[in-house]
Amino acid sequence: MIFFLQLLVSGLAVGSVYGLVALGFVLIFKATDVFNFAQGDLLAVGAYLMFVALAVFNLPVALAIIATVVAAGILGAMLQRVVFKPLQGQPLLTVVMATIALSLIIQGALVIIFGSQDLSFPRTLPSSIVAIGALRLSMLDLIIMGCSVVCVSAFALFFRYTSLGLQMRATAEHPEAAALSGINSDRVFTVAFSIGTVTAALGGIFLGSLQVVSPTLSQIGLLAFPAVVVGGLTSIPGSVIGGLLIGVLQQLSAGYFDGAVASVVVYSGLLLVLLLRPQGLLGRPSVQRH
Amino acid sequence: MKPEILGAAKIAGALLGAGILAMGTALQPAFAQDTITYGVVSDQSGPGVPNQLPYLRGIQTQFNKVNDAGGINGRKIVLLAEDDKFQVPLGIAAYKKLASNDDVIGISGLTLSGTQVAALPLVAKDKIPVVGPDGTTDASLEPFQEYMFMLVPSYPVQAQVILGAMKDRVGKDKPKVADISVNVESGLGWQKLISETAEAAGTEYVGGVLMDATATSADAIVLKIQQMEPDFIAAHTTGGQANLILKSMEKFGLNIPVMATYASGTPSAYAGLSPEIGAQWQFVHGITPPSVPTDGGKQMLADAEKYGFGKDAASSDFVVGYVAGQLVVQALTDAGENPTRETYHQALVALKDVDTNGLSPSVSFGESRMGINLARPYGYDYATQAFTAVGEWDAYRQYVK
């Protein structure tokens, strides 16, 4: 039983990171209808920004996180202005291809700027071991899980109760109607990309703390894709629940079977959800009138 | 078309045009008579980048150095580096592109184990020498491959050193060994190798676990290993995975020694850990990592800085590429004024006791095609943030059969 509980807790910790990255996907998709394939790369960018803040500017950890979050927010806004704004109104495939191109550019740029070697944060978030009965957790696991809960709650409230959140939802539902009612869609899109990039960067900070900073973080970030699909493309809580499910499935299958089985289990689960509930666990089915 | 899109299209067109022009400029000398064309297939944009890009940079450093000195018999080396993006089909396509180019005299790389295995029959058919992949597969050793020239010690040699050295260190009559292996071709091979050779090495195999290449936690793996109660672990992982395993070992209080293959030999494996838990992980290698002071290492780091590869030169894979480049240059020099694939192949076979100035034991390909047939362990010193060699090379010859 302890073995199961330990795997469950480890899965929740890892799944929280996937959930954060998935949250960024959903925020951008919900507000702009853009499925951003570069989200995993923005996660890697977040890890490298944190590395620069710690190793180059020698900032304390807390300040380095704030600096990374601010820089990621600015980067997101710039990406929207430079890359995605000119593509507004273009066919979906064009926009998807642009996000794939952006992904490849970021991967190449990171190797050019930082080299190909794995890097590590010179100072990290607290990672002391906490024992809860027979269960063992690291402080880092707890921080990651706490941060996910805070983020998902904050964004859920933001979309439900703030003017900007409501404007973002309205723009996503019907961009033309939103524009006619006076909503500044440019502002909405810019904020969406900023927030989406910030959540990816937070995922990068956590993953970089869990292991090392390397270009391969982009690949790990892609594990948020199944989380998004499982949770539902338009559901904020769904993205985090999807991330948690993927993390737990991964850990349980690695613990009870093998690391090789984890991918099979995760993607079988993804397929099952797509077959039984294409809109995801918490997504709403889209209805089209012909 | 919207003006913004038109603008973007114009920029993309200009960049594409500039790229084609640049490519044309780079490729042009390959077909000239006064050059020697050489190919590399490696991962320049996928998850293998941390290992395989430094390897490529090491080769490039040697080629730049020889070109600056006037080339080989007056002919400069032109390097055609193909990116396999860590995908076997792309690696094979890259290999075919190079092998079908009659000007390409030899190839290095093919490090991705799946690509290496798939390319073996093609290499034999094309009779093109492949020098110093930054990794070996069982299939490249058995049956004998005439045109494959391995540089790093084979996995069987690494396994012999790991099992033998750890048995002596643990000090038990028959210590129990478990393995942790990355879930790729070479990892599956490593698991099989340890399970099959543990008994002969005087140890008892108690089981193993596979670790996904993109794993973000090793908790499940370490919990499983804990249940097996081994005396030591024989691992085959990357540096990032080693870091995850050590963090999980620390979390669960698993305090047993690990000795791993060379792939985990990166400083990042030891990052963010207490020195006590970091001291549990050693790796074996057939070369001397750059942070261990040697005359050859000093020269290599100076060369790397000169050619703009200083960032990559901290990697042991850079050393492998650098030594591979040295051997290629030596064999091309020995292959005569107008080297062909066959004369180059003969020159490689004839290379004997090449001195790498402390970067490795002396290298001979000979009939076995195994350039370095020895490995020794390395640990990490947190005070100096550098690797330290655990003993001299000769101390580990006793374990290699």
Image (cartoon, grey):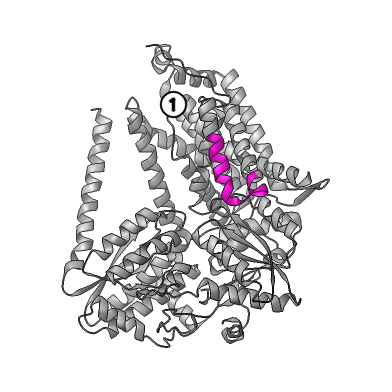
Considering every residue shown, the one lying at the far left of the view is B33
Around disc 1, counting alpha carbons within 10 Å, would you say few (fewer than 14), some (14 to 19), or many (20 or more)?
Answer: many
Residue B347 lies, in percent from the top left, at 31, 83
Depth check, front residue: B355 or A2: A2
Residue B80 lies, in percent from the top left, at 29, 64
* Chain letter of disc 1 in the image: A
Within the magenta stretch, is there residue A268?
yes
Which residue is painted at 49% across and 67% down in the image? B315
Task: Give the amino acid type for the residue marked by disc 1 in the picture.
Answer: Thr
Compared to residue B117, the image places residue B354 above or below, namely below
Residue A21 lies, in percent from the top left, at 55, 38
Secondary structure of the residue carrying numbered label 1: helix
Q: Quadrant of the C terminus of chain B?
A: bottom right
Within the magenta stretch, is there residue A122?
no
Depth check, front residue: B196 or A116: B196
Report if residue A22 is visible in the image.
no
> Looking at the image, how many numbered discs can be counted on the residues?
1
Report if residue B292 is visible in the image.
yes
Which residue is painted at 52% across and 46% down in the image? A220
Residue on which disc 1 sits: A32
Q: Which residues are magenta?
A: A253-270
Depth check, front residue: B286 or B221: B221
Q: Is residue B122 left or right of residue B27?
A: right
Q: Main secondary structure of the magenta part?
A: helix
